[in-house]
Amino acid sequence: MSVYKQQLLQLLASVEGLTAEASPVGGGTALFFRGKEFAHFHHDHELDLRLTKKIIASLGLSHPSGSVHHPVRSAGLPWIEVRFNSEQEVQRVAEMVKLAVAQLQSGSVSR
């Protein structure tokens, strides 16, 4: 496991209701909030995260070029791949994960 993935998981360890477990689909690590998967790692430097379309747009996020796992993902989906290769990017992704958890708590994540 990379140092950045470890840092991200450590930053998220204090979020009540959030667990990191084996993904039942992909076999890697997934993030769950109260038993519901809302993110999974494609590898140690990329997280596929379920946010709302509104949050994705408000943060100015876009599908990364060169995506191996979702090369033709529609921009209208509530999922976004986020990559992290520095401590600053780890912090940014941790904040996005916390936004996703807040959306799950409020029940406003759309399918």
Image (tube, rainbow, N blue to C red):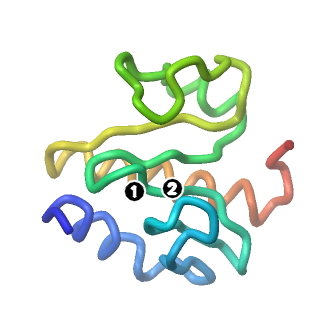
Residue 32, picture quadrant:
bottom right
Establish if 88 lies above or below 32.
above
Residue 81 placement, left or right of 37:
left
| Rendered location of residue 100, percent (x, y) | 62, 53
Q: Which mark is residue 97?
A: 2
Q: Pick whichever, 97 or 71, lies toward us.
A: 71
Numbered disc 2: secondary structure = helix
Residue 8 placement, left or right of 78:
left
| Rendered location of residue 76, percent (x, y) | 73, 20
Residue at the image position 63 percent from the left and 37 percent from the top: 79
Pointer 1 residue: 94
Residue 103 placement, left or right of 72:
right
Numbered disc 1: secondary structure = helix
Residue 28, picture quadrant:
bottom left
- The three-letter code of the residue at mark 1 reads Ala
- The three-letter code of the residue at mark 2 reads Val
Establish if 62 lies above or below 105.
above
Residues marked 2 and 1 touching at CB (< 8 Å): yes
Residue 106 placement, left or right of 47:
right
Establish if 45 lies above or below 64.
below
